[in-house]
Image (cartoon, rainbow, N blue to C red):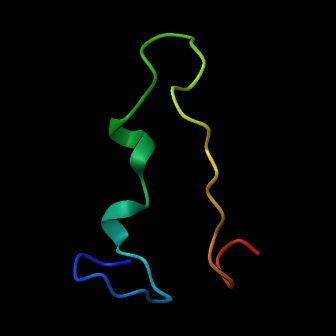
Amino acid sequence: MDRDGKVGSSSSPRRYFCLQCHVSQANVDPIVPNDFKPMKGYGN
């Protein structure tokens, strides 16, 4: 979903590399479960 609320089949390149900045600082369990499911055609 983009910032205008439209669901599309493409992703913004700025969303690809979360772990470049958001890295774990301690070995702890996640606060919320990860229920990410890729869109059809991306990783499926």
Q: Give above or below for 39 relative to 24.
A: below
| Residue closest to the eye, 36 or 25 | 36
Residue under the point 22% across and 83% down: 4
Apparent side of residue 15 relative to residue 10 in the rendered image (left or right): left
Q: Check the picture and name the quadrant holding the C terminus.
A: bottom right
Total marks placed? 0
Q: Give above or below for 22 relative to 5.
A: above
Quarter of image, res 8: bottom left
Residue under the point 60% across and 18% down: 29
Residue under the point 64% across and 77% down: 42
**Residue furthest out toward the right:** 44
The image position of residue 7, as x and y in percent, is 42, 86
The image position of residue 31, as x and y in percent, is 51, 26
Q: Give above or below for 31 relative to 41.
A: above
| Residue closest to the eye, 33 or 14 | 33
The image position of residue 1, as x and y in percent, is 39, 77
Residue under the point 35% across and 74% down: 12
The image position of residue 41, as x and y in percent, is 68, 85
Q: Give above or below for 4 relative to 32.
A: below
